[in-house]
Image (cartoon, rainbow, N blue to C red):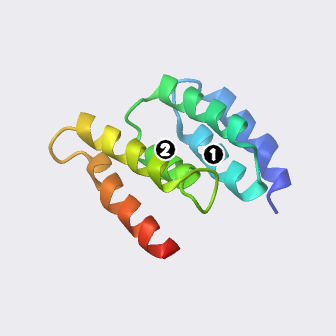
Amino acid sequence: MLPPAYEHLVHAANAAPDRPDALNHLQWFGLGAGMSREDLDFLWDRIIERDPWHPMSHQSRLQVLCQKWEGSHEEMFAFARQAAALARKGDPLLELVPRAHVERFIML
């Protein structure tokens, strides 16, 4: 089911160059399709160029950085803590640290 989605997601990303939503879906697509970490990192760079605070993209990036996918616990926690440190009171990015702990617990 994933391969046909790629072309549509790329089209959507190109149609709205100021919005990160389609790129975020490409990030999820990449996890499911086994995209290389290098390609996932490239997508992340494009996402934060469009919106460095996009909450849904940060949540999917956290998944990319999980040990169970393409990263490590250390990398995942560093990402979550950095985002939370820069977030303002009430920002959805503050939930990344607890989410990272849940991901770590799942691996136990």
Q: Is residue 94 above or below residue 50?
A: below
Q: Residue at x 40, y 59 (%)?
A: 100
Left-right relation of 62 to 28: left
Q: Which residue is mark 2?
A: 57
- Which quadrant: the N terminus? bottom right
Residue 31, located in which quarter of the rendered image? bottom right
Between residue 92 and residue 62, name the one nearer to us.
Answer: 62
Q: Residue at x 42, y 73 (%)?
A: 105
44 over 8 or under it: above or below: above
Q: Are marks 1 and 2 in contact (CB under 8 Å)?
A: yes
Between 77 and 1, the residue placed more toward the observer is: 77
Q: Is residue 86 left or right of residue 68?
A: left
- In percent of width and height, residue 43 lies at 63, 34
Q: Amino acid at mark 1?
A: Gln
Q: Which residue is mark 1?
A: 27
Quarter of image, res 86: top left
Tell me how many marks there are: 2
Marks 1/2: CA distance?
8 Å
> Looking at this view, is 55 or 105 the one in front?
105
Residue 58 x %, y %: 44, 45
The mark found on residue 45 in the picture is: none
- Element under label 2? helix
Q: Secondary structure at mark 1?
A: helix
Tell me which amino acid carries mark 2. Ser
Within-10-Å neighbours for mark 1: few <14, some 14–19, many 20+:
many
